[in-house]
Amino acid sequence: MDYFLTEEQQMIRDLARQIAQEKIVPVRAELDEKEEFPWEIMKVLAESDMCGLYIPEVYGGMGGGCFELCLATEEISRACGGVAVCYAASGLGTYPILLFGNEAQKQKYLPDIASGKKLAAFGLTESEAGSDAGGIQTTAVADGDHYVLNGTKQWITNGGEADTYTVVAMTDKVKGSRGASTFIVEKGWEGFSFGKKEKKMGIRCSSTTELIFRNCRVPKENLLAREGMGFIVAMKTLDCTRPGIGAQAVGIAQGALDEALSYARRRVQFGKPISSFQAIQHMLADMATQIEAARALVYATARHVDSGARNVSKVSAMCKLFAADMCMKVTTDAVQILGGYGYMREYPVEKMMRDAKITQIYEGTNQIQRNVIALQLIKESASK
């Protein structure tokens, strides 16, 4: 379909696709096998000005938004979901500063992120808290000109590799989620360390670690917004970044369809390519239709986010939910079309199926997305 991309948006998509094919496809299996962070590819993305697509020009970015970030994420994901999340998760860590940072904070942190000199990460999840932000145990206690952070964050994407972390901690535990606040924390500060790198089912080249705070002193000027705004900062951030997960899911699924189509045309059984069998044709048709539907919803949602609309939670949850469920089905079907070959690591659809699963889990499970959607529907209905 023609999504009426501007000339600049077409260039972003085409450049991301070129990088994906030339730099990522040849090494994706090795990166997955070795669980190696793709720094060389991240450097290529930085040199190509891809890291600042969604950051205003005044801070060294390209002046785009969620939509441009989604275009790039989709194309990178088409080659490798693991590399894509290394790239896109920096946006997740940056959006709290974009949305709630003061001018001094933006001037200090955004230029290095926009240039790709530094990566960012977002620290919300803990062993007892993720979707339930009120369960956060990490604390931030005011002490003179600083806050002292203590606690542990879990499953943090880009953990250990990023330099800039936006971290949610409790400044008043009595108030539950209304007692949470968000801080900008820098790698290398005393009292801030990392746990072991997790071994995962998919997106293996991505670094997933604990963030450990032991009397880590954070300057008060690194508080985002104000005390008690942490939950709002986190939710508004996720509203803007969930379309990126949708884009990742669309990209992974498109890559799987590409492989399934190519294989179906080559594979001969009973004297014919299996692409001539109606059973395979129907699977391919359903896969393509589902991908296009998800892409349309992701693009529309990203543009809605960029329009400045105030309430985007429902549609943001919808696009993440729909695209992620679609991705899991399409990659499973791709493995089925390839048969025994699809189950072998020699062929990329096995990896794509493993990578697909996480899109249903991180940045809020798809069950949580359904809660968000339903509660908003009920709220809207009650106000009519």
Image: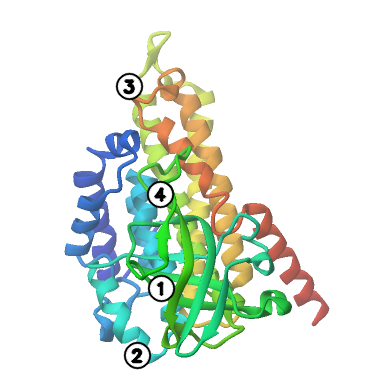
**Disc 4 versus disc 3: distance between alpha carbons?**
23 Å
Q: Amino acid at mark 1?
A: Val
| Pointers 2 and 3 in contact (C-beta within 8 Å) | no
Residue picked out by circle 3? 266
Residue picked out by circle 4? 251
Front-lying residue, 47 or 188: 188
Residue depicted at x 50% and y 77%: 148
* Vertical position of residue 220 compared to residue 347: above or below: below
Say whether residue 282 is visible: yes
* Vertical position of residue 55 compared to residue 35: above or below: below
Instruction: Give the class, few, some or many, for how many residues have Cα within 10 Å of label 2's Cα (few <14, many ≥20).
Output: few
Instruction: Give the class, few, some or many, for how many residues have Cα within 10 Å of label 3's Cα (few <14, many ≥20).
Output: few
Quarter of the view holding residue 61:
bottom left
Q: Earlier in the sequence, mark 1 or mark 4?
A: 1
Label 4, secondary structure: give it. Answer: helix
Q: Amino acid at mark 2?
A: Ala
Residue picked out by circle 1? 185
Instruction: Give the class, few, some or many, for how many residues have Cα within 10 Å of label 4's Cα (few <14, many ≥20).
Output: many
Residue picked out by circle 2? 104
**Disc 2 versus disc 3: distance between alpha carbons?**
58 Å
Quarter of the view holding residue 265:
top left
**Disc 1 versus disc 4: distance between alpha carbons?**
32 Å
Instruction: Give the class, few, some or many, for how many residues have Cα within 10 Å of label 1's Cα (few <14, many ≥20).
Output: many
Quarter of the view holding residue 228:
bottom right
Q: Amino acid at mark 3?
A: Arg
Front position among marks 4 and 2: 2
Q: Earlier in the sequence, mark 4 or mark 2?
A: 2
Front-lying residue, 12 or 218: 218
